[in-house]
Image (spheres, rainbow, N blue to C red):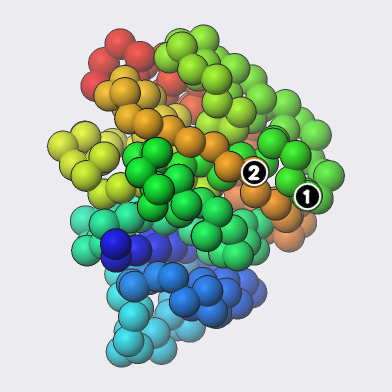
Amino acid sequence: MKVSVIVPVYNERKTIEEILRRVQRMGIADEIIIVDDGSTDGTREILESYICRDQFRVVFHQRNQGKGAAIRTGLKEVQGDIIIIQDADLEYDPREYPNLLKPIQEGVADVVYGSRFLGAPRRPILFWNMVANKILTLVTNILYNNILTDMETGYKVFRREVIEGIPLRARRFDFEPEFTAKILKRKARIFEVPIAFYPRDYSEGKKIRMKDAFEALWALVKYRFVD
């Protein structure tokens, strides 16, 4: 099965080339779709050198629209059978790809979440971010009758047909709850695997803020009752 990797990017000049090297080094991605979401720090200029490279496809947003909007743009471009969402920082390691793909390849899952809370190594920082993640996951499980451990994970891998016909509207970090809510309502088979996690703090460029947790909470409630 052909594998497509979508890399949403916004102001990641320091890490973008390294993460793309790591993705390519795995030898798993048949295509790497990079969506620059209106970067202003020099990332855009770096990505221009990838336009003519084999395996890469680069799409530029003229203005910043948010991570969800960048992912949605990438989803319109994919040609693969399996899609991997890969953040452009170095928090998520592409060496996890084989474990993330295995449940789909073995036919036991349609969607795989890489869980940061199933015992794999991780850098222990940002306590309140962890608390927010745990609360949002708990709300997800209550509303959608599930037992996920990490709804907010950035590592989501899925068959392309899972999202065909699903209206996705997220523009910012509300992509995670919207995607989760809608695939749970459609009874997609979800599998979780443990992943190592290397979080950065705000001084290193982390972008998600507490207000995003409230937007995620509202998305979970809203999409429980509407589509």
Q: Which mark is residue 121?
A: 1
**In-front residue for pair 129/163:** 163
Q: Is residue 183 above or below residue 16?
A: above
Give the percent coordinates (x, y) of residue 185. Answer: 31, 20
Q: Residue at x 34, y 80 (%)?
A: 55
Q: Is residue 93 left or right of residue 24?
A: right
Give the percent coordinates (x, y) of residue 78. Answer: 25, 61
Q: Quadrant of residue 139?
A: top right
At label 2, which amino acid type do we have? Pro
Q: Is residue 16 left or right of residue 84?
A: right
Q: Is residue 47 above or below residue 3?
A: below
Q: Quadrant of the N terminus?
A: bottom left
Q: Is residue 66 above or below residue 109?
A: below
Could you tell which of marks 2 and 1 lies nearer the N-terminus? 1
At label 1, which amino acid type do we have? Pro
Give the percent coordinates (x, y) of residue 39. Answer: 46, 67
Distance from label 2 to label 1 (Cα)?
9 Å
Residue 44 seen anywhere in this rendered image of the structure = yes
Q: Is residue 155 above or below residue 45?
A: above
Q: Residue at x 34, y 63 (%)?
A: 3
